[in-house]
Amino acid sequence: MVDQGHRLPPMAIYGKIFRLMEKNYLIKIAYDGSGFSGWQRQPDKRTVQGVLEDTLSFFTRQEIKLNGTSRTDAGVHAMGQCASFKGDFSIPTENLLKAVNASLSGGQARKFTVGDVKILSIREVDPDFHARFDCKGKTYRYVIDNGEEADIFRRNYTGRVGEPLDVELMREAASYMTGTHDFKAFQSSGGEERETTVRTISGITVERQDTDVIIEVTGDGFLYNMVRIMTGTLMEAGLGKRTPESVKDVIHSLDRANAGPTAPASGLYLKEIYF
């Protein structure tokens, strides 16, 4: 005789079976952030997470919840954002990718256009994988328009410095930011509370390409607005408004007031994520 006290209710049985059938997926995403209120879903606002979750849910016929690696702000772009999600659906991943991207670009009626968000790849991953918690590092890119005349058509995709930047001074200043430090001075207020503000920056490059100055920063993690504040501080060094050596004092001070300004969101790109 079955012990009725230990029998699972029917809905609990179905839920358990569904969880066993679910698979875990990792998607890589590119987006133009100028038309979004950031990555994270927000009520009554257009966000990257919201648009993707709604579209994926429509084509898989189930509710999809994304776990994004990075919560980029409004106006910030991505070349390699990543997110994981779980689901049980029969549509092959290559067909799902095509269907979602076609929908995001306006459907077949607009097949010669591209949307402002695109899934670059979808693949199945280990059941325990989590795009945020399994991230080992990220690379951000910041693009500065440093030409004599501002380019109106790039205003949503670059930061702007009209005076010539000294790239060598910027590189020297950047050298003091590499390594493991407490980066509290490079954190804006209002972000998610972190247990520690110590981070490791494994590399920073500063290169001039035509009229652009491009900064790339790789680290194991970043604080709220950290890359944009680092960029603003490097801009000041490049303009001769601070010495490269002063960066050491900024770090040791742990005081946001001593660092440079927060560079505009428009020039920032989440380039790559490492797992």
Image: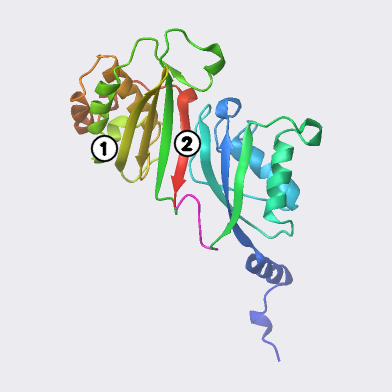
Which numbered marker is on residue 124? Answer: none
Instruction: Report if residue 81 is visible in the image.
Output: yes
Which numbered marker is on residue 270? Answer: 2
Quadrant holding the N terminus: bottom right
- Number of residues whose C-alpha sits closer than 10 Å to that of mark 2, classed few (under 14), some (14–19) or many (20 or more): many
Classify residue 130 as left or right of residue 217: right
Q: Is residue 30 above or below residue 264?
A: below
Q: Give residue 35's quadrant in the image.
A: top right
Q: Which residues are magenta?
A: 127-133
Identify the element where label 1 is drawn: loop
Q: Residue drawn 62% across and 49% down? A: 65
Q: Is residue 264 magenta?
A: no
Give the image location of residue 105, x and y in percent: 71, 34
Q: Which residue is mark 1?
A: 178
23 and 209: which is toward the camera = 209
Identify the element where label 2 is drawn: strand
Q: Looking at the image, is mark 1 or mark 2 earlier in the sequence?
A: 1
Q: Is residue 131 magenta?
A: yes
Q: Of helix, strand and loop, which mostly describes the magenta segment?
A: loop
- Number of residues whose C-alpha sits closer than 10 Å to that of mark 1, classed few (under 14), some (14–19) or many (20 or more): some
196 and 91: which is toward the camera = 91
Classify residue 61 as left or right of residue 167: right
The kind of residue tagged 1 is Thr
Q: Residue drawn 76% across and 33% down? A: 111
The kind of residue tagged 2 is Leu
Q: Are marks 1 and 2 in contact (CB under 8 Å)?
A: no
Give the image location of residue 31, x and y in percent: 58, 34
Report, in whole angstroms, how far the alpha carbon at label 1 lies from the one at label 2. 19 Å
242 and 171: which is toward the camera = 171
Give the image location of residue 257, x and y in percent: 28, 23
Model colouring = rainbow
Q: Which residue is situated farthest in the right direction here?
A: 109
